[in-house]
Image: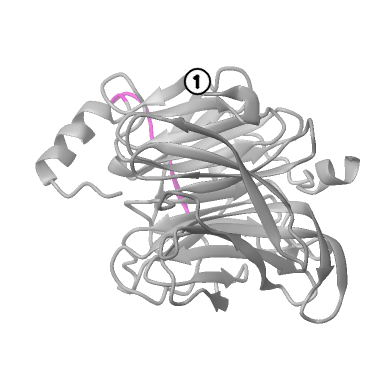
Amino acid sequence: MRIRSLAVAAFLLAAARPPPQETVPPVAATVETTPVRHGGDAADDPAIWVHPSDPAKSLVIGDDKGGGLLTYGLDGVELQVVEESKHINNVDVRYGMPLVGAYEDGTAHERVDLAGAGNQTDRSLIFYKINPATRRLEPAGAIAGIGLTPYGSCFYRSPVSGKHYYFVNDRSGKVQQWELRDGGSGKIAGTRVREFEVGSIVEGCVADDTRRRLYIAEERVAIWNYGAEPEDGSPRIRVDFAGKGGHLTADIEGLAIYDAGGERGYLLASSQGSDTFVIYERAGSNAYVGTFRIVDGAVDGVNDTDGIEVTSAALGPAFPKGLLVVQDGSNTRPAANQNYKLVPWESVAAAFTPPLLVEPGVDPRAAVRRR
């Protein structure tokens, strides 16, 4: 959500930007995606799918709120668009969902890599299996009648039960948790297992599967840390906040987890009001690490960012040490519709002293194979 009042924006920026003595290092993207197909505030949230055998064939998946869910290669070129008539908001990916059926090329499957998104047009959750042979999204069903208009959403896979869940929230601050299952005929079905209120408008969310935590961005207020299991209820811990003394400037938008193995790594957040990105420790109480911004380089810098995603996986020669993907609210060089920028993770890591962790050997499918 964007702040429309310049006076309010100026006040919030002055009150909540990092202290003057703190250096905010610059990093640069090396690749940008094809612009989304609709103008205005259209691009919103990205996800990253890691190919199981050839990481260079991995995908960036993004949404176009004017209509569509899109995939891009690591060179930024658009490969596919689905749901062109639907208003899609937020997208996420998880691996190894039990689903018996076959891909469109006839290949049988018992587990699939799944992309999920919120469909605001139909007030539903939609799912696509990702065919590793064709790198294409294929329909895997929807959960209709969820009782709210989806705004933000994200997956969670429980390390306790092995079950897959999907969180969805709306602009009022309501959050639902849906347990996913094989609904037959190669389609996903779901049951709502939890609901709670955050307090005010929320969107960005990310689940840490290893630590069993759910992080939610209450846009004008704070990042909150909740338990991710269905029985965890509504108790929460504040990670950071927007305003004097915090490291964030409203709106607080996208959230992402950099997995460095075990419980190591980082929680990242988009501080939209200050055009910066804030990093916290993944473990413990999510201590503040630092803030950076993305500036002009091989492609233009970013501002007014909504969604973000990051992976520590080695993605071939273009991104051998991991990848950060961010939405760019103003695509300026050349001027065009909004798009997504791709930043090598090692560029972010090297911007800090001491450097951040770089762990490109982490396999995002390892937890699924252990069960």
Q: Is residue 336 left or right of residue 361?
A: left
- Residue 367 in the image, given as x and y percentages of width and height: 82, 41
Q: Is residue 144 visible?
A: yes
Q: How is the image coloured?
A: one colour
Task: Determine which quarter of the picture holds residue 204.
Answer: top left
Quarter occupied by the C terminus: top right
Q: Does the stretch in magenta take in 255?
A: no
Q: Position of residue 250 (x, y in %)?
A: 29, 37
Q: Residues within 10 Å of mark 1 (few under 14, many from 20)?
A: some
Position in image of residue 48 (x %, y %): 62, 57
| Residue 245 drawn above or below residue 192 | above
Viewed as shown, does residue 127 lie left or right of 320?
left
Quarter residue 9 falls in:
top left
Residue 21 is inside the magenta segment: yes
Outermost residue to the bottom? 105
The residue labelled by disc 1 is: 236
Give the residue type at disc 1: Arg
Q: In the image shown, does 246 or 236 lie closer to the viewer?
A: 236
* Front residue of this view, candidates 195 and 77: 195
Q: Is residue 350 above or below residue 2?
A: above
* Residue at image coords 52%, 40%: 176
Q: Nearer the viewer, residue 300 or 254?
A: 254
- The answer to which image quadrant residue 19 occupies is top left
Q: Is residue 53 left or right of residue 129?
A: right
The residue located at (32%, 23%) in the rendering is 21
Q: Which residues are magenta?
A: 19-29
Q: Residue furthest left?
A: 7
Identified at 42% across, 30% down, the residue is 197
Q: Position of residue 307 (x, y in %)?
A: 45, 51
